[in-house]
Image (cartoon, coloured by chain):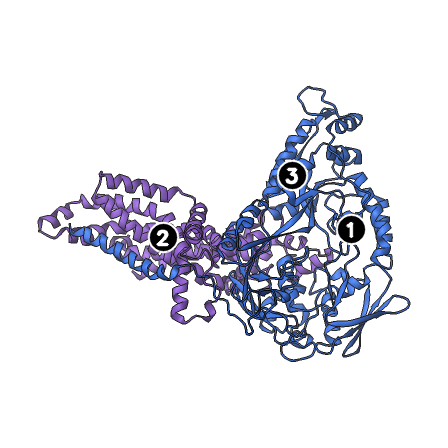
Amino acid sequence: MREKFSLQALVLAAAGVLLALFPVGCRQTPERAAGPGAASASTPRRGGTVVTGWTAEPGGVNSLILPSTQINNEMLFRMFLHLYEEQSDFQVHPATFKPQLAESYDWSPDHKTLTFHLRGDVFWTDGVPVTAEDVRWTWQAQRDPDVAWELADSKDWITDVEVVDPRTVRFHFSRVYAKQFLDANEGPVFPKHAWEKLPFAQWRQNGDWFRQHLVVDGPFTLASWQPQQQIVLQRNERYYEKGLPYLDRVVMRQIPDQSSGLTQLLSGELDFLPQLNFGDAPRVKASPRLELIAYWFNIYVALTWNNERPLFKDPEVRRALTLAIDRQTIVETLLGSYGKVADSPILTSVWAHDPALHPLPYDPAEARCILAAKGWRDTDGDGILDRNGKPFAFELLTNTGNQARTDATVMIQDQLRKAGIRVTPRQVEFNTLATQTIAGKFDAAMMGYTIDTSLDLRSNFHSQSIAEGSNYPRYRNPEMDRLIEVGASQPDLLAERPYLNQIQQIAHRDQPVTFLWESQRLTGVNKRVRNVRPTPTFAFFNLKEWWVEPNG
Amino acid sequence: MLGFLLRRLAASLLLLLLVLTFTFFFLRLIPGDPAHIFEGQRLTLEQQQRLRQIYGLDRPLPLQYLTWISSVAKWDWGTSLSQQRPVSTVLGEAVPATAILAMAALVVEYFLALLLGIASALRRGSALDHGIRIVTLLFFSLPLFWVGLMVVLLFSYVWPVLPASHMHSVDADLMSPAGRLLDLARHLFLPALVMGIGTAGGTARFLRASLIEVMSQDYIRAARAKGLSERRVVWVHGLRNAIVPVIQVFAIQLPVLLSGALIVEVVFSWPGLGQLTFLAISTRDYPLILGAVALSATLVILGNLLADILHALVDPRVRDA
C-alpha cells in the first residue's frame, strides 16, 4: 500500500498550490484609487482608473507610419492635439470644429491662404511650448515620401506651411475646394524638437524610437506599455484645459477574443467595451451594473457587385438583384432594432443624406420581369435562369469572423434562389477578401464601407479610384466622375450638397452596390463610469471628461 | 558522447536551415504578397512602391531569401510591417510569456499524467482504470478553445475566483515583488491548466502502457523476490524505466504545446508567441509570421536535441549507436 502514499503526496502537493492561489482568488476588481475631493454622485470628480477592453493593440505612437485604424486613432488622438477638434454634430449640418491647438483662424480674400493663431499655453510634456514650427515640421513629415503617411493625399493641394511667428502659421493652397479646412487640420501635430533627430528615411524601421522619445500635448500621456497586454494612459499634468482630464489613469487591455471581453465586462473586470455583438445586447441590458449605449455608426454594409463582370455590367440587372433581396427581413432578423435598410453611400444619420431617397422595395416579381427583359429565362426548367446556355450563378464572398454578414449571405442565397439565381456563398479570411476585391478577382462580395465626415465619395465611386482607391465595385460612370469633381471643387461642404444629392441619386439608380444596412454600434459601460459619450468616429471621443463615482 | 553531440548538433542545424527555407518559400505561396499589407491602407501606388523598396520587397524572391537568411544568421529577423519594429524585439518580448506558460503547463501535464498513469497501470482492469481511461480520452479529445472558454465561464464568471485573462492584474505595477509573483501565479493557473489538460491525457495513457510493460519484466519480479518494498519497486525500478519513452514523448510534445499555446493564449489574452502569431497572421505581417514560425521551429528542434541528449544520458546504448 506504500504506493498509495506517493500518489497521495502528489495530490497533497497540488492541493497546497491551490490553497495558495484560491484564498486570494476571491473577486479582485482592480483597486481604483479615489482622487482628492470626493464629490456627489452627479458632480464630476477627479481621480480613479477606468479599465477598457480592445480586440487589437495600437501599433505605436507615431500615427504617420501607422495605418489609420480605429485603435491607433483612439489612443493617439488623446495624446496629440489637432489644430481644431472635429465635433460629432454632423446630423443636421457639416461637422463643426472646436479650437484645440489653435484658438482662431482666418481666410485670405481669395480663399487660398488659411492662417491659424495658436494658443500660447500649450506645452509638450517636457515643458517646451508647442509652436508654429511644430505645425510646419509635421506637414513636412506628412508629405515626405519615405514616411509614406497613409493620408498624405490630404495635403496634395497645400503648397506651403509658413511660420509667420511662433504662434501664427499659414497654410497656402494651390486651389479653392470644399475640404480645405479639413485637409489643413488632418492629422495631429507632432513635436519637432523631440522627433526631428531621426531622419524621415529611418522612420519606418524604428517605430520603437518614437515611444522612447515620447512627449505629448494632449490630455493623456503614456504611463506604461506591456505588449499584447495593456497600455496605461495617465493624466498629462501639463494639459492646457485646467481641471481636465478627470481620470488619473485609463487602462487599455488587449482582449483579442470578443467573448472573453464580454465575460470580463459582465464580471466587472472591465469598465468599458467599445463594440459588442448584437446578440450580446440582452445580457448587457440585464446586468444591473452595466449600461448599453447604442448609436448610429459610420459604416454601411453593401453587396459589392463586380461591375466589370458581364453578369453585373448592366445597371438594370443590378437593380433587379436589389429588388429580389428582402433587405427589411434581413435587417429585422439579424440586427433587430439596431439596424435599418440602407439606401445611399451617405448614411441616413448624416446631414447630407438625400431625404428624397427611399430604399428600393422587395419586389421579386418586378425583378423577374427586368431579368426576363434582359433575356434571362429558365429555359431548361432547373429553377435557375439562364441566357445563351449560361446559368445566372455567381460566388458571394464575405469575411470570416462576422456572424451577421455570414448569416446574411445565407439569407440572400435563399432569396435569390427563389428569383432563379444561384448564389454560392464563400467565407474567406479578411485579408484575402481585401486582396481579391482590390484586384477585382471576385463576382460579388459583402463588405462594410466606412464614410467619414468629409463625405468624399471619390474613393468609392470615381473611375480613377479603381486602380488606386476603394472603388471595389469597379464602377465607371463619366457623369458620376464629373459630379464628384465639381462637387469637391465647391468652396465649402454646404455648397457641395446639390452635387452630393445627384451623386446619391445616380448610385441609387445604377446600384453599383446593393446597399444592405446601416447599423448601430453597441458599447457596454459600467455605470460607475460617468459622462461617457462615444461618437461614430471615436469611442474615446470625450475621454478627458469621463469620471468615476466615488465609491464605484 | 562528444561525437554524438556534434553529430546531433550538425543534423539539427541542417534541419533548421531546411525548415527556415521551407517556411520562407511556403509563406510566399499564399495568395498575395507581403506588400498587400499596404494595399489595405489608403496609400497611393507610389507610396506602396516606396514602402516595398524600404522593406526590400521589390527585389526578386531568391535575393530576398538570401538577404533574409544571412540576416537571420546575425539574429536580425527584419522589421515588423505592422509595428515598424525589429522582429527580434517583438519576439523577444513574447518568448518569456510562452516559456512560463509552457513550463507551467508541463508541470500540470506531468502531474496529472503521473497521477492518472500510475494509478491506472497499478489497478489495471479495475473500475478505476476504466474511469481513468475515459477521463484521459476526454482530456485528449476536447477542443482546447472550448475547454478554455468553459473554464473562464466557470472560474471567472459563475464562481469568480480566478482572473479570466492576461498575465497580470491591471495594477500589478504597484504590487510588491511577492504580490506580483502571486498575481502571476493566479493568472497562470487557468491557461496552464487548460494547456496541461490538453496534453495530459495522451501522456497518461502512454505512461500507463509503458509502466504495465515494465512491471511485467523479469527484473521487477527479481526486485520483488529480493524483498524490496512495493513503493521502491514501483517508483525506483518501475517508473525509472517506464519514464524513458516518456522523455521522447516530451520532445514530440513541444510542437503540440506551441500549437496549443496559439489557441490558449488567444482565449486567455496571454502575451506570448501564440497570440503574437495569431495577430501577425490577422494583419498579414509576413516578417513577423516568418519570425514566429521560424522561432517555434527552432524551439522544437532544440527540444528534440535536448530529448536526444537526455535519452543518451539515461540510455548509453543510444550514444553508442
Q: Which mark is residue A332?
A: 3
Q: Position of residue A309 (x, y in %)?
A: 74, 37
Instruction: Name the residue rendered at 56%, 68% in the picture.
Output: A249
Q: Is residue B91 above or below residue A215?
A: above
Instruction: Name the residue rendered at 69%, 39% in the picture.
Output: A444
| Chain whose colour in the figure is purple | B
In depth, the one of A133 and B68 nearer the eye is A133
In depth, the one of A333 and B84 nearer the eye is A333
Is disc 1 on the same chain as disc 3?
yes
Q: Is residue A242 visible?
A: yes
Chain to which mark 2 belongs: B
> Which secondary structure lies at badge 3?
helix
Q: Amino acid at mark 1?
A: Leu
Which label's residue is closer to the chain start, 3 or 1?
3
Q: Amino acid at mark 2?
A: Ala
In depth, the one of A270 and B33 nearer the eye is A270
Instruction: Name the residue rendered at 23%, 56% in the picture.
Output: A9
Q: Position of residue A55 (x, y in %)?
A: 56, 55
Quadrant of the rendered image containing residue A304:
top right
Read off the residue under disc 2. Answer: B251
Q: Nearer the viewer, mark 1 or mark 2?
A: 1
Q: Which mark is residue B219?
A: none
Q: Amino acid at mark 3?
A: Glu
Total of numbered circles in the picture? 3
Q: CA distance from mark 1 to mark 2?
A: 57 Å
Instruction: Name the residue rendered at 83%, 50% in the picture.
Output: A484
Chain to which mark 3 belongs: A
> Which secondary structure lies at badge 1?
loop
Q: Residues within 10 Å of mark 3 (few under 14, many from 20)?
A: some
Read off the residue under disc 1. Answer: A457
Q: CA distance from mark 3 to mark 1?
A: 28 Å
